């Protein structure tokens, strides 16, 4: 949503007005976690670590070349679920995510939107595929932790329950005693949309680039914004 037709603005207005609980994906809507710490390099390092253990053949060429470290982790878990090898790789990824928080870039308007939504009485949670330790570290660095605490639901050892599985979304809803229809999920990937849909939660897409917007719309998102500024304006009203 750029200039924003009246129909689009009305749809956004209805989403915002109906939300009593707001569930945020982390990497994207809240910040660009890997803005200064290349996700592609992290993925390459995880692949190299596997190859160093003689496990080159566990990954397909597509998985091996993916710029997303989560793809590497989930690929290993599919082949060796619950193994010590998966646990160690997950710890390595968490370590790299923690390093990335130092150079993470806040999403424009996210900080004031988070504070404003809290101030008007909405309850907030994070539902993410990133490590909850990483989310807490970033929110602490921005002074935003009180807006969410204790409702941070991230990656667990059950990697098969990462989004698009609705597990983290349902955990948030259950912990907050919230009905799905009174909540709103803000995400920037089709997996966020699918998780929200499976949990029965209305969805607001955030797309930093045109390509991300296309992917969200192709997946079925009906309200997509390329900036959180119009959301902030609505909440302030």
Image (cartoon, rainbow, N blue to C red):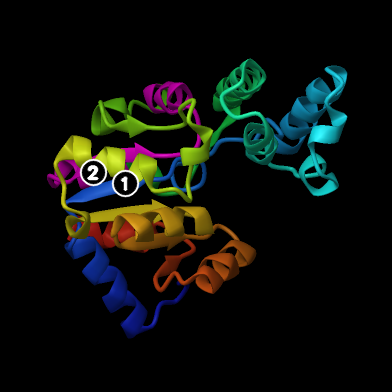
For the C terminus, give its image quadrant.
bottom left
Residue at which label 2 appears: 173
- Residue in view at x 68 percent, y 34 percent: 79
Query: Measured from the top left, where is residue 25 in percent x and y?
Result: 42, 45
Q: Mark 2 touching mark 1, by CB under 8 A?
A: yes
Give me the residue at 37% from left, 40% from top: 168
- What is the total number of numbered labels drawn onto the structure image? 2
| Residue 143 percent across, percent down from the top left | 34, 25
Nearer to us in this view, 116 or 146 = 146
| Secondary structure under the numbered disc 1 in the rendered image | strand
Name the mark nearer the viewer: 2 or 1: 2
Residue 7: % across, % down: 32, 84
Which one is nearer the viewer's eye here, 48 or 107?
48
Q: Is residue 61 left or right of residue 80?
A: right
Range shown magenta: 113-140
Where is mark 1, residue-wise?
A: 23
């Amino acid at each position: 949503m750029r200039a924003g037709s009246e129909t689009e603005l009305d749809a956004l207005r209805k989403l915002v007005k109906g939300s009593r609980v707001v569930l945020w994906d982390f990497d994207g809507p809240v910040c660009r976690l890997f803005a200064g710490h290349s996700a592609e390099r992290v993925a390459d390092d995880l692949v190299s670590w596997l190859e160093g253990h003689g496990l080159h053949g566990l990954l397909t060429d597509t998985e091996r070349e993916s710029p997303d470290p989560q793809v590497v982790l989930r690929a290993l878990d599919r082949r060796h679920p619950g193994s010590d090898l998966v646990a160690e790789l997950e710890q390595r990824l968490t370590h790299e995510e923690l390093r990335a928080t130092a150079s993470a870039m806040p999403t424009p308007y996210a900080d004031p939107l988070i504070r404003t939504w809290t101030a008007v009485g909405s309850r907030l949670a994070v539902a993410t595929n990133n490590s909850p330790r990483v989310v807490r570290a970033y929110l602490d660095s921005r002074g935003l932790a009180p807006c969410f605490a204790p409702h941070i639901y991230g990656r667990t050892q059950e990697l098969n329950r990462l989004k698009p599985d609705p597990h983290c979304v349902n955990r948030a809803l259950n912990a907050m005693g919230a009905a799905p229809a009174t909540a709103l999920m803000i995400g920037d990937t089709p997996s966020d949309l699918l998780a929200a849909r499976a949990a029965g939660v209305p969805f607001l897409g955030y797309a930093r680039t045109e390509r991300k917007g296309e992917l969200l719309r192709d997946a079925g998102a009906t309200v997509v914004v390329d900036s959180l500024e119009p959301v902030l304006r609505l909440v302030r009203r």
